[in-house]
Image (tube, rainbow, N blue to C red):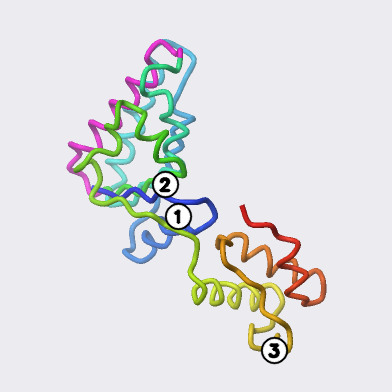
Amino acid sequence: RGVLLLGKPGNGKSHFAKALGRSVGWPTLCLDLGRIFGGLVGQSEENMERAMAIIDAVSPCILFIDEIEKALSGASGGGGDGGTTVRVGAKFLQWLQDHESEVFVVATCNDIKALSAASDGAFVRAGRWDAIFFVDNPEPAQARAILGLYLDEYTGRALADYQGQDEPNLSGYSGAEIKQIAIEAAYNGGDLGAAAGFVIPL
């Protein structure tokens, strides 16, 4: 059915969906739930049905939904939109539960509490997804490998070429923040310490 990737931003949750599609040879479709909602009565529900029909027709495919909690944050009924978000959310949940097409859903979420609040936990209950994975900041060895990859991309030098410099402490940095360190190092001539000092991790 699909997986929900929970975790801090900047650690590759979105990249995973694209990499998965390439790995299995399926196209990756991106569903922007925010664009489903229309201004006319019944338009949002109709848009959702049309989107699901298109996705089923394209299958087999990967369906990627980024930051699902933001689009569905009003599904608990407090959005003041006349219940539109509730109905759209219910249509998506019904499709997720019942569809028989070869569509594997990869949804990302930064705030599990907001997603759980939608429809009283219906989006995160047991059995809704095949699995829920927490994606944390990289561990030291992973962070060092990520820095090496991006240094090679942006400076043309491997991490080993920076011997003699004190390697920055990457504890608490996301993958995106480590990428930014490499970019800063490219701008300042290769001073990793200064680059790391410039990038403050969230």
Specify the quadrant of the image occupied by residue 10.
Answer: bottom right
Under circle 2, the secondary element is strand
Q: Are marks 1 and 3 in contact (CB under 8 Å)?
A: no
| Mark 1 to mark 3 CA distance (whole Å) | 32 Å
Residue at 77 percent across and 77 percent down: it is 190
Instruction: Estimate the x, y position of residue 18 in percent, counting from the top left.
Output: 43, 57
Instruction: Estimate the x, y position of residue 77 in percent, counting from the top left.
Output: 37, 17
N-terminal label among 2 and 1: 1
Under circle 3, the secondary element is loop
Q: Identify which residue, 4 or 58, lies in the foreground.
A: 4
Query: Which residue lies under the disc numbered 2?
Result: 108
N-terminal label among 3 and 2: 2
Residue at 43 percent across and 44 percent down: it is 109
At label 3, counting other C-alpha atoms closer than 10 Å, the crowd grade (few under 14, some 14-19, many 20 or more) is few
Tell me the amino acid under the disc marked 1: Lys
**The magenta segment:** 80-102
Q: Are marks 2 and 1 in contact (CB under 8 Å)?
A: yes
Under circle 1, the secondary element is helix
Query: Which residue lies under the disc numbered 3?
Result: 163
Query: Which residue lies under the disc numbered 1?
Result: 13
| Mark 2 to mark 1 CA distance (whole Å) | 6 Å
Magenta stretch: includes residue 137: no
